[in-house]
Amino acid sequence: NKDRIGLEDDMGETKKRASFSGKVGFVLAAASSAVGLGNIWRFPYLAAEYGGGTFLLIYLILAVTFGFSVMITEIAIGRKTGLSVVGAFKAIDKRFAFCGLLGTVIPVIITPYYSVIGGWVTKYIAVFVTGQGHAAAQDGYFSSYIAEPVQPILWFAVFIVLTAVVVALGVEKGIEKASVIMMPILLLLSLVIAIYSITRPGAGAGIIYYLKPDLHKMTGKTVLAALGQLFYSMSLAMGIMITYGSYMKKTDNLESSVRQIEFFDTLVAFLAGLMIIPAVYVFSGGDESAMGAGPGLMFITLPKVFDTMTGGHFIGAAFFILVFFAALTSSISLMETIVSILMDKFKWKRRGTTVLVTIYCIAVGIPSSLGFGIWSGVKPLGMDILTFFDFISNSVLMPIMAFVTCIFAGYIMKPAAICEEVEQEGVKFRFRKFYSVMIRFVAPIGIIGILVSSVAASLGVFSW
Ligand code: TRP
């Protein structure tokens, strides 16, 4: 049954396109790429840092406007051309061939540091499985762990090698099947932990902080952070959704698929914030500086939550295992993108290419890890090395890529062509007018405005 062949069966191997087994298959595959560390690790610490409810509100508004439009566009381009990012733009207009390069550079930047965080998650599985959950709940545990020169790099290596083995053997399908079971369990467990967190004494102020917008706190930086987070979390603005779209059947409803992927992705992020942010208040006694913990926030806060819970150490282990799988499906999809582009371009073999990409990732991931310890003096743009890579991809390159995608769809292909792709087989595009205005005017102008204003503000602060 040809229709039942999954996404990876022919990725990079042949030019023939198989398709997902129906809409549910498509939504689940795209959602399992989208749901990952972006939702669970990154969203809560940004929300904490950028004013809680203010960030949440901006994020939600951007999701249903910019996010919706860009995701529709990417999937439609993919389904229309049947190509991945490298070929799709070029096939429609040669002048936009550089988008293929831009869409390749972004995963090349993300994959190494993504796997460093994957290594932190793997370490925390070990911590909870070996019964050291109580130690991990102590102040300073996490920061002294990531400051170590060797151990975090070893766990990072474990994570990236696991990713590479799956990519090298081409067995992503098995992992994806597992993640389809894991994702609902992760959602359920997050709900349980979130309910526990928000019912702790002292959580009230944290709940208000997380849910109540305070528009005085709205700055250009907040909006850019939310925009970058949106693209990152939904795997947009790097062409990956073009690839997914190229495998989508013409008979599947594109618009409602997009809405479901967005809903699911946002729900996971929202729950992650609810688990973590009120708990920060509970354990720091409302100390505002605890909100600015940055990339470590989840690893600092959740062990404290688990430590006070009955059966918390078991729940902690289960939680980190589930997050591990969510991270692994994303890192596999990220690495697969790089590997398949190289294979197509240079006609290389899968295994050799994977080894090469892995060596590259380790080489670039090591500085990101050391930036929290012995290289903490290296501060490009005033950030630690990992945050710097994260900033370049999410706050600079992704908005540029999204902007170009809007221009491409709005003025080269024209919204009518995208809408026609959405309206296959007599399906109506409910937000057709809204989409056309978004993609031509609101989204591109908004993205450029946000980008220019905040990059200008942060320029000239390079220091060692
Ligand atoms: N969305 C993923 C997450 O939230 C990260 C990501 C960005 C990604 N782009 C991707 C994953 C492309 C797979 C493919 O963790």
Image (tube, grey):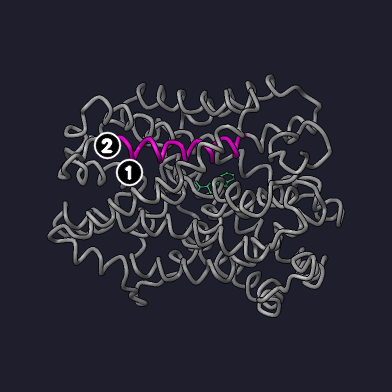
- Which stretch did the figure color magenta? 315-335
Residue 204 image-quadrant placement: bottom left
Look at the image and tell me in which quarter the N terminus lies.
top right
Q: Position of residue 11 (x, y in %)?
A: 73, 36
Residue 12 image-quadrant placement: top right
For the point 33% across and 37% down, which residue is it?
318
> Is residue 395 or residue 268 the one in the foreground?
268
Q: Identity of the amino acid at label 2? A: Ser
Q: Which residue is mark 2?
A: 143
Q: Position of residue 65 (x, y in %)?
A: 58, 71
Prevailing SS of the magenta stretch:
helix
415 lies above or below 169: below
Q: Is residue 259 left or right of residue 229?
A: right
Q: Which residue is mark 1?
A: 296
Q: CA distance from mark 2 to mark 1?
A: 8 Å
Disc 2 to disc 1: CB gap under 8 Å: yes
Residue 323 included in the magenta stretch of the image: yes
Work out whether mark 2 precedes mark 1 in sequence or the reverse, and give the earlier one: 2
Q: Is residue 105 left or right of residue 463?
A: right
For the point 53% across and 30% down, which residue is it?
364
Label 1 environment density (alpha carbons within 10 Å; few <14, some 14–19, many ≥20): some
Is residue 411 visible in the rendered image? The answer is no
Q: Position of residue 39 (x, y in %)?
A: 44, 51
Q: Identity of the amino acid at label 1? A: Gly
Look at the image and tell me in which quarter the C terminus lies.
top left
116 lies above or below 240: above
Is residue 251 visible in the rendered image? The answer is yes
* Disc 1 residue lies near ligand 1 with CB under 8 A: no
Q: Is residue 336 left or right of residue 209?
A: right
For the point 33% across and 65% down, which residue is it?
52
